[in-house]
Image (cartoon, helix red, strand yellow):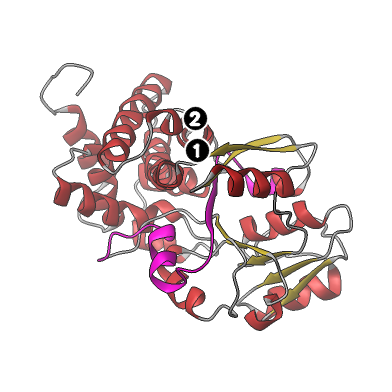
Amino acid sequence: MTSYSRFGVVGGGAWGTALAQLLAAEGAPVRLWAREDAVVTAINAEHRNPLFLPGASLSPSLVATGDLADLAACDALLVVVPVPFLRAVLADLPAGHAPLIFCSKGMEAQSFAFPIDIARDVCSDRPLAVLSGPTFAHEVAAGLPTAITLAAADTATAEALAQALARPHFRPYVSTDMIGAEIGGAVKNILAIACGIVDGAGLGLNARAALISRGFAEMTRFGLARGAQADTLAGLAGLGDLVLTCTSSNSRNFALGQGLGRGADAATLMADRRTVAEGAFSAPVIAAAARADGIEMPITDAVARLVAGDIRAGEAIQALLSRPLRPEGR
């Protein structure tokens, strides 16, 4: 079995920094590429990332860089770049055959491509994997117990990467269903915004539970239509991540939804945020992809219209509540 010991992380946001700290916590050398000069300087000089992960102390063995060429010697790369910027960053990676482990969640506009699809276009000679599941960055950085899905096209690659990433408090479960892991991660962010709206509007826990259940039905319909496995969608990368992000204001997506539910304007809320609520970018893309494929996703569609500013929260809630009654399985 191939072993991996020299990890690089592409992306210096909260999740990228947390993953880099996970790998460097016991003194292993880890390289992290960040676009922001302030992030590179703070990590190297102060062993902190106050811009995106305040409060976390970082290992001295974690070294940041603003030059992707500095990752050339890494034998595996965790890619934690927002999907709208992913294609350009992948094109600038140094040549090599190190596996790419995708940790970002979403779908590219126009192409309806997930990260692994983009990678197949840009760097088709590399092994690909997806890391997805119920994780808050600050908890992973602090060493709190976490379980996650690690999916790769073949079991041997998945097992080798999982072995290299595993820590006593960080447990990857192996899968070969990369598309299921990607769809679960992308759709749950949209549903977290919807649950935040329910909370912000004061609609109660009954409504939130109903939305999680009906949202999971949407995720499943969309996933199965695109070749995902039902077990993946019902596992850590799907239902597990859905429960986490739909029940805590620590979720950026849930917090955005809370603001929308209280009547705030989507554009204003997003302009005030330093970190990305990925569901706001994913919602219109996945809603369009679902329409193109004839897949019914009313919650996703409502969130897409909300973040676009086409409707307000009250209108979206009323539209969902007034839908025709139907059997639960549909």
Label 2 packing within 10 angstroms: few (<14), some (14-19), many (20+): many
**Is residue 319 toward the left or the right of residue 70 in the image?**
left
The numbered disc on residue 2 is none
Q: Is residue 282 left or right of residue 221?
A: right
Q: Where is residue 128 in the image (x, y as percent from the top left)?
A: 52, 57
Q: Please, what secondary structure does the residue beneath circle 2 have?
A: loop
Looking at the picture, which amino acid does disc 2 mark? Gly
* Residue positioned 13% across, 28% down in the render: 323
Q: Mark 1 points at which residue?
A: 237
Task: Please report the bounds of the magenta region as a residue range.
Answer: 110-139
Residue at left offset 46%, top offset 55%: 277
**Do the residues bearing badges 2 and 1 touch, measured as CB atoms within 8 Å?**
yes
- Amino acid bearing label 1: Ala
Horizontal side of 116 relative to 156 (left or right) equals: left
Give residue 71's quadrant in the image. Answer: bottom right
Q: Nearer the viewer, residue 34 or 171?
A: 171
Element under disc 1: helix
Closest to the observer, 202 or 20? 20
Q: Which of 88 and 82 is in front in this view?
A: 88
Nearer to me, 301 or 16? 16
Please give the name of the residue rendered at 65% of the width and 62% of the height, measured from the top-left corner.
52
Residue 235 has which mark? 2
Residue, far left: 324
Q: Which residue is drawn at 19% across and 24% down?
A: 330
Where in the figure is residue 121, as x and y percent of width and height? 38, 70
Q: Position of residue 3 (x, y in %)?
A: 74, 54
**In the displayed structure, would residue 67 be above or below residue 209?**
below
How many marks do you count on the picture?
A: 2
Instruction: Say above or below: 236 vs 139.
Output: above
C-alpha distance separating marks 2 and 1: 6 Å
Q: Does the magenta stretch include residue 128?
A: yes
